[in-house]
Amino acid sequence: MIILQLSPDRRTFLRALRVLRVHPRLIYPRSVSPTPNGTPQTLLIDADDTLWENNVYFERAIAEFISFLNHHEFTPQQVRERLNEVERESIKTHGYGIHSFANALCNTFERLSVEQLTQELRERIRAFALRIAEHPVEIIAGVPETLRHLAGRHHLILMTKGNPAEQTSKVERSGLKDYFAAVEVVAEKNAGAYHAVAEKYALDADVTWMVGNSPRSDVNPALEAGLHAVFVPHDMTWVLEHEELAAPTKAGQRLLKLDRFADLTSHF
Ligand SMILES: [Mg+2]
């Protein structure tokens, strides 16, 4: 360990191990490490359903809405499909977040119900969505320890999309903010947003990774922007975030697929 501290250069370090007849695997026990020479990396880290639970509350609200609507012709699955369509439209005008979702629930009711959407009904439907904001932030298992490990070795930036006030409030309430050098709340996570963040912080794409649960918002656009990516799937990922994972396209670009957020400690 003293040698490692005195000599951060990997080649010199390995030479020293050879002289001491210590097999490198005893020091680097992992077969795959993106940071074999210990170069600090920049990790852009998603928040919703990566650091804390999020979509599960929306799924509960949707279940409440579907049972409240109690449609006599459409199955719950058909109602859900209509809601997904309305949400796609709602995002275009209202962005992401609870108010956009509440708006989508009311529009879906108007489209599917024979009953008129009175002010009272509107309030009741909106309440299914607004309750989500009152939910305490539930941190995913292993996240604080993992962030503590990563923050001591790398440069962490939280990158989330959505309503700035809602997202900032969750970051504050999570107790995780101090692990991050910066917090970026963007309207949409596309390749342009990743290019903009990389430019803002003068990030070197060769040592910058996006970590998150969404193929559509985290992995694919980050790869498109030339960054590396880490996919950490979540069982409850929102259906609008589903997409086939893209493959790295440039030489040296990496895509890691992990089972859990805590597995990041094996690679970084
Ligand atoms: Mg997410």
Image (cartoon, rainbow, N blue to C red):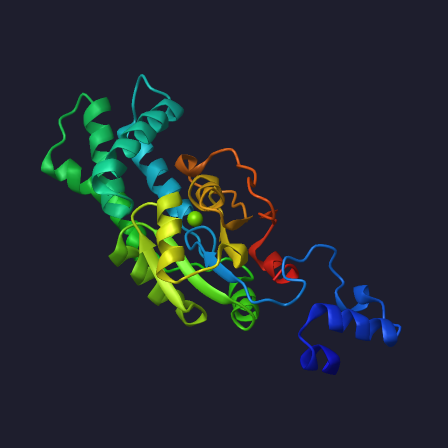
Identify the image quadrant of the N terminus. bottom right
Can residue 151 be seen here? The reply is: yes
Q: Is residue 48 left or right of residue 73?
A: right
- Residue 31 falls in image quadrant: bottom right
- Residue 16 falls in image quadrant: bottom right
**Image location of residue 122, percent across then percent down:** 16, 38
Q: Is residue 54 left or right of residue 255?
A: left
Q: Residue furthest right?
A: 21
Above or below residue 142? Residue 92 is above
Above or below residue 151? Residue 235 is above
Query: What residue is at 56 percent from the left and 65 percent from the top?
Result: 146
Identify the image quadrant of the C terminus. bottom right
Q: Residue furthest left?
A: 119
Q: Is residue 213 left or right of residue 98?
A: right
**Image location of residue 46, percent across then percent down:** 44, 54
**Image location of residue 187, percent across then percent down:** 29, 48
**Image location of residue 252, percent across then percent down:** 61, 48
Query: What residue is at 34 percent from the left and 67 percent from the top?
Result: 172
Label tally: 0
Above or below residue 171? Residue 233 is above
Above or below residue 224? Residue 28 is below
Q: Is residue 90 left or right of residue 243?
A: left
Depth check: give the residue in front, 260 or 73. Answer: 260
Can residue 189 be seen here? The reply is: no
